[in-house]
Amino acid sequence: MKPGLALIPAGQLKLEGIIEVPDGAPGIVLFAHGSGSSRHSPRNVYVARVVREGGIGTLLFDLLTEQEAEDRENVFDIEFLARRLIAATDWVRQLDSAKGLSIGYFGASTGAAAALVAAADDQAIGAVVSRGGRPDLAGASLPRVKAPTLLIVGGDDTGVIELNQEAYDRLTCKKELKIVPGATHLFEEPGTLEEVARLARDWFKRHLRGSRTEKRL
């Protein structure tokens, strides 16, 4: 399937995005950007491409409008971001091209916390991956997450490693914590983002099993 423009209703607003679902995909991953970044985030665009190469669909979209992102309080309003992600999830489920697909979340920075809060409220979410995220900000939602969750942290991102370990300890779902050696917070070092993408792709391939796949078995 060719990339398509997504206009996702969120109250009186329309959030812009790009959706692409390969033929025969068992699932689709919604990307929750953090710290005010958008669907154009080069790191998430790269990870999304690798995920699609693994046969999984992707939706890259803006959690916040440009005007909203200028207010730093919105960037750290996890409940607000989670509601936006839930709105996008509801929109995806209404698409003919997504019927029977399992849904996963990929979150970065504060978007990771939003993904976990949304997954705690929607127990049908199939998998969650956090990249350099702040899952600790999901707070009381962490023990309620049922989706298999992978936390990925850079080995040189020391403060964030500790916060991810704290969140990991509070999760009661199937979970893994992967530390990428030599990586800092943005995974800018050679080969580190490639490792993130590989880990994410494999996690989603393992856990997103939509009804389309089941019918073929």
Image (cartoon, rainbow, N blue to C red):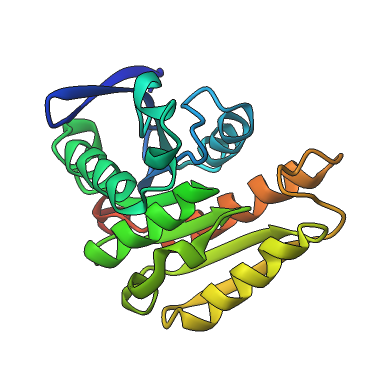
Q: Which image quarter holds the C terminus?
A: bottom left
| Residue sitting at x 35%, y 58% | 209
Taking depth in this image into account, of 63 and 27 the one nearest to the observer is 63
Q: In the rendering, at what x and y percent does residue 17 appear?
A: 36, 23
Q: In the rendering, at what x and y percent does residue 83 appear?
A: 24, 47
Location of residue 144 by image quarter: bottom left
- Residue 53 in sight from this viewpoint: yes
Q: In the rendering, at what x and y percent does residue 180 appear?
A: 77, 59
| Residue sitting at x 29%, y 67% | 120
> Measured along the vertical axis of the image, is residue 148 above or below residue 12?
below
Location of residue 73 by image quarter: top left
> Measured along the vertical axis of the image, is residue 54 above or below residue 10?
below
Q: How many marks?
A: 0
Left or right placement of residue 107 versus residue 93 in this view: right
Taking depth in this image into account, of 181 and 21 the one nearest to the observer is 181
- Residue 146 in sight from this viewpoint: no
| Residue sitting at x 34%, y 74% | 140
| Residue sitting at x 41%, y 51% | 105
Q: Which image quarter holds the N terminus?
A: top left
Q: In the rendering, at what x and y percent does residue 38 appear?
A: 47, 27
> Measured along the vertical axis of the image, is residue 118 above or below residue 8?
below
